[in-house]
Every structure is written in C-alpha cells, then in structure tokens.
Image: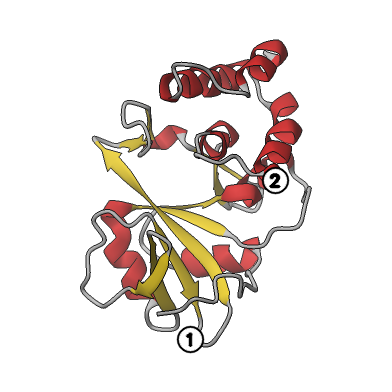
Amino acid sequence: MRTDYDHWEPISVSEAAGIFAEIPARWYIAGGWALDLYLEEQTREHGDIDILILREEQAAIYAALAKEWTLYKADQGTLSLWEEGEYLHSVGDVWVSRNEEAPFSFQIMLVEVEVDSWVYRREPCIRRPLQDISLITDQGIPYLKPEIQLLYKGGSKNIREKDERDFRKVLPFLDRQAAGWLAQALRTQFPSGHPWLDSIDTTS
C-alpha cells in the first residue's frame, strides 16, 4: 500500500491524449485541465491530471494500461493495487504510476452511465446524455464540459480555494444555457442553497 499521496509528476494533456487515443473506450480530460482547455489557456499550475472514463468500459482501460503502468484504487483515503480481473463496482478514482516507486502520473475518474446518460454520482437524478457531456479541442482532444466540471468542484463537501478560483475564472465565459444548467444542478443537490448561486444568477 502506498502512502506517498503528494508524490506527483503529472503527464501533459498531449501525453494523456496519446495514451488514451489508442484505447477502445471513451475518455475525457477532466479536472482543472478541462476548464483550461475550454478557456484555451493555462490559467494556473496543475498538480495532477484527471481523465474521466465510463465505469462500464473499465476493462478495456485496465487491459491497455496495465501493460506499462501500475494502477491503484483510491478509496476511503487509501491506495491499493487494482488487480487483474477485478471489477471496480464503487471505486471512483484510480491513480496511475509507472511502477510502485515512481511518482503518480495521472488519475482516472470512473463515472456511472445509465441508458446512454452520464449520471452524477452525488445526486443521481442529475444526468445528461453522453453525447452532451464533452467538447473537443482543435487538436481533437475530448474534455468535460465546463458546467459539468464546475458541478464536480462546487458539489464537493469542501470547496477548495483553487476550485473557487476556477469558478470565478470560468463563470464569465459560460453561455446562458450552461450557466443555467449548473445553477439548476446545484439547486438540486443543495436545496437549501449554495454559495455560487448568487454569482451565477447575476452573470446569467
């Protein structure tokens, strides 16, 4: 079991794309990098890089990556090896490194899908057709739409300072439909209110 949680040397977006483009499964750049791809500029340093995949396609991902990478299940604050043939029913994150001593290179986020719709795990009534969760850069790299990525950030139990900064940077560039969807999703998850709603309502 590894405990060096801060031992990161993340690969670049282009390196991640080169790895995942060869795998017969759907994937999307997520996290802070997804927002920077939307803004078409790097707005801050990124301590890691997240790739979102569909839980139902995890076998193809594992088969392709396990040849050259070591994969760890990140669950309840611990890291343990993802073993060959093991199906991850509930684990949401996998950390990946070259070997058991190497720094972590990227993180995989597994998401639920039902009837061709992405399902938001924290509030499963929030969903969206799979064909409507991503955008593609001019270089052909798929990434998570900003309103969905901001929901992941704003929907966390603890909104980090970098999440707040990301929200403030991206909000002015959301169109009315995206901002409205984010506001409705936050209201659904937090019926008693959310600190971002006033800003969204004012902007949109």
Is 151 on the left-hand or right-hand side of 113? Answer: right
Q: Amino acid at mark 1?
A: Asn
Q: Which quarter of the rendered picture does the C terminus lie within?
A: top right
Query: In the image, which disc is placed on residue 162?
Result: 2
Visible residue check, residue 21:
no
Point out residue 149 in the picture as x, y percentages from the top left corner: 55, 39
Please say whether residue 55 is visible from this viewpoint. yes
User: What amino acid type is highlighted by mark number 2?
Assistant: Lys
Expressed as whole percent of the image width and height from the top left, the position of residue 85 reads 21, 73
Q: Which element carries disc 2, helix, strand or loop?
A: helix
Distance of label 1 from label 2 (alpha carbons): 29 Å
36 or 164: nearer the viewer: 164
To which quarter of the image does residue 202 belong? top right
Q: Is residue 109 left or right of residue 102?
A: left
Where residue 183 sits in the image (x, y, percent)? 54, 19
The residue pinned by badge 1 equals 99
Q: Residues within 10 Å of mark 2 (few under 14, many from 20)?
A: few
Rendered position, 130 above or below 23: above
Q: Which residue: 48% across, 72% down?
A: 96
Residue in view at x 37 percent, y 27 percent: 126
SS category of the residue bearing label 1: loop
Q: Is residue 114 above or below residue 59?
A: above
Nearer the observer: mark 1 or 2; the answer is: 2
